[in-house]
Image (cartoon, grey):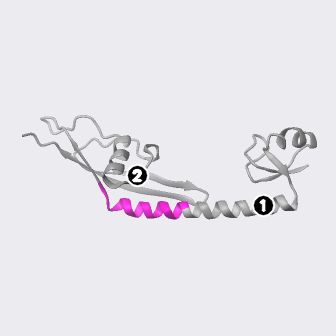
């Protein structure tokens, strides 16, 4: 029996693939659980239409990510940190704090898990951190955010 998979199925195939399976497996397991549909010309046409829509959506997401990457190049996220007598900064600025700073200062929402550089910003001055803005079938887009940490002035 030829079926079109609606979801990834272990040891059978990925979503959208047309595969041959045993009649009983297809009729009694895959189709009732809505993991697959029988491969017909109508279902093949629906699959092709869905694939085209998904590809267009992925291209739109990639374009949006590229625009955000260009915008991030010209942005500095500002932080103020306490500094010890030796000139070293107390603590670090984590990716979570940087994501919150982007949201508050520039109204840009980025998930803290998208930061590629897992090392926190821990030095006075400028630090550049890479962010994975898009990863999908249309490729990958990586942006860079500039973090400026200045010394807290006392008195």
Q: In this view, does 6 lie to the left or right of 71?
A: right
Q: Which residue is drawn at 49% across and 58% down?
A: 141
Q: Where is residue 31 in the image (x, y as percent from the top left)?
A: 84, 44
Q: Position of residue 126 (x, y in %)?
A: 26, 51
- Judged by depth in the image, the label closer to the viewer, 1 or 2, is 1
Which secondary structure dominates the residues rendered in magenta? helix
Question: Range of the magenta residues?
Answer: 61-76
Contact between marks 1 and 2 (CB within 8 A): the answer is no
Q: In which quarter of the image is residue 12?
A: top right
Instruction: Name the quadrant of the C terminus.
Output: top left
Q: Does the magenta stretch include residue 65?
A: yes
Q: What element carries label 1?
A: helix
In the rendered view, tell whether residue 110 sits above or below residue 11: below
Asked whether 71 or 135 is in front, the reply is 71
Q: What element carries label 2?
A: strand
Neighbourhood count class around disc 2 (C-alpha, 10 Å): few under 14, some 14–19, many 20 upward? some
| Picture disc at residue 130 | 2
Instruction: Give the alpha-carbon distance from disc 1 to disc 2, as whole Å.
Output: 39 Å
Q: Is residue 66 magenta?
A: yes
Q: In this view, does 135 lie to the left or right of 21?
A: left
Q: Which residue is drawn at 77% across and 47% down?
A: 13
Q: Where is residue 79 in the image (x, y as percent from the top left)?
A: 25, 46
Mark 1, residue position: 46
Asked whether 39 or 105 is in front, the reply is 105
Q: Where is residue 36 in the image (x, y as percent from the top left)?
A: 81, 47
Q: Residue at x 46, y 47 (%)?
A: 114
Neighbourhood count class around disc 1 (C-alpha, 10 Å): few under 14, some 14–19, many 20 upward? few
In the rendered view, tell whether residue 140 sits above or below residue 90: below
Outermost residue, left direction? 155
Number of numbered labels in the structure image: 2
In the rendered view, tell whether residue 98 sits above or below residue 66: above
Reading the chain from its start, which is encountered first: label 1 or label 2? 1
């Amino acid at each position: 029996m030829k079926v079109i998979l609606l979801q990834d199925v272990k040891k059978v195939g990925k979503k959208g693939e047309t595969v041959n399976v045993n009649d009983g497996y297809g009729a009694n397991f895959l189709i009732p659980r809505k993991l697959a549909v029988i491969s017909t010309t109508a279902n093949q046409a629906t699959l092709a239409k869905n694939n085209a829509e998904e590809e267009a959506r992925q291209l739109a997401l990639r374009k949006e990510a590229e625009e955000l990457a260009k915008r991030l190049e010209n942005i500095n996220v500002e932080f103020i940190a306490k500094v010890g007598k030796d000139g070293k900064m107390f603590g670090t600025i984590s990716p979570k704090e940087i994501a919150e700073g982007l949201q508050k200062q520039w109204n840009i929402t980025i998930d803290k898990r998208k930061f590629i550089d897992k090392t926190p910003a821990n030095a006075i001055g400028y630090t550049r951190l890479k962010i994975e803005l898009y990863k999908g079938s249309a490729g990958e887009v990586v942006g860079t955010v500039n973090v400026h940490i200045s010394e807290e002035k006392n008195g």
